[in-house]
Amino acid sequence: MGRIDFNCDMGEGIGNDALIMPFISSASIACGYHAGDPAEMYQAVSLAVKNNVSVGAHVSYFDKENFGRTEMNLPEPEVYELIQQQLIILKEITDIFDLPLRHVKPHGALYNQSAKNIRLARTIATAIKDFDEHLILFGLSGSHSIREAGSIGIKPCNEVFADRTYQDDGSLTPRSEPHALIDDPRIAVRQVLQMIRGGTVQTVNGKIIPIIAETICIHSDGNHAVEFAKSIHSVILSEN
């Protein structure tokens, strides 16, 4: 296995970016559509530069009221445009630091819908490629997001989650359902080790399913995000 990336969603106004940043290798920075504003984006990019962390755009539906977690059914041209606009917004800030954007990661409902919807996945991948064909798309392991990115010629990166549980089809357990979130650092570490070493994850129903772990994500808004970051950082160091 190649080097394992460790990413976290940043610039969302949670207040712990500075505590988490030293332990990750990639930061997905909110672009103002589900959270954040130019000042928070600037601060997040500044912290990333200070900690030698790669920066990507955490793009979303325009839905601050629901933190980007409400499903929408937008026309493809509108999705294309909202992706491009968020990339422009963040690049204006990274250019100040002469820092290249490395990746793009959809957020929330946009992420989960594109994992299952081929046309939405292709629209997102196309918007990214048209902006910069060298950008990497972070998408749910084994999903349409990954396949469509590869099929149009941009590099996909299979993402897995340390702080979320899985359904039998490889999707994440919806946040509205019980046991969607992992709050115990020991369970999170055990899940990460299984994904790294075995290429599998155990679902909420006890089924063992295959998974590809190229980048591991935690959410900065989790109750134990800083503790998770420290614990998983240690695991990844030992496995890389």
Image: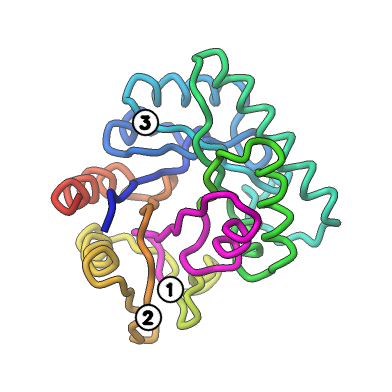
User: Can you give x and y, in whole percent of width and height, for residue 209 in the image?
Assistant: 37, 80
| Secondary structure of residue under mark 2 | strand
Check the image and report above or below for 135 versus 212.
above
Asked if labels 3 and 2 touch by Cβ distance under 8 angstroms, the answer is no
Asked if labels 1 and 2 touch by Cβ distance under 8 angstroms, the answer is yes
- Amino acid found under the numbered disc labelled 1: Tyr
User: Mark 1 or mark 3: which is in front?
Assistant: 3
| Secondary structure of residue under mark 3 | loop
| Colour setting | rainbow
Structural crowding at the residue carrying mark 2, measured as other residues with C-alpha within 10 Å and reported as few (<14), some (14–19) or many (≥20)? some
Q: Relative to 76, is 36 on the left or the right? A: left
Residue marked by disc 1:
166
Residue marked by disc 3:
53
Q: Relative to 53, is 194 on the left or the right? A: left
Considering depth in this image, is 233 or 14 the residue closer to the camera? 233
Q: Which circle's residue, 2 or 3, is located before the other in the chain? A: 3
Q: Which residues are magenta?
A: 139-165
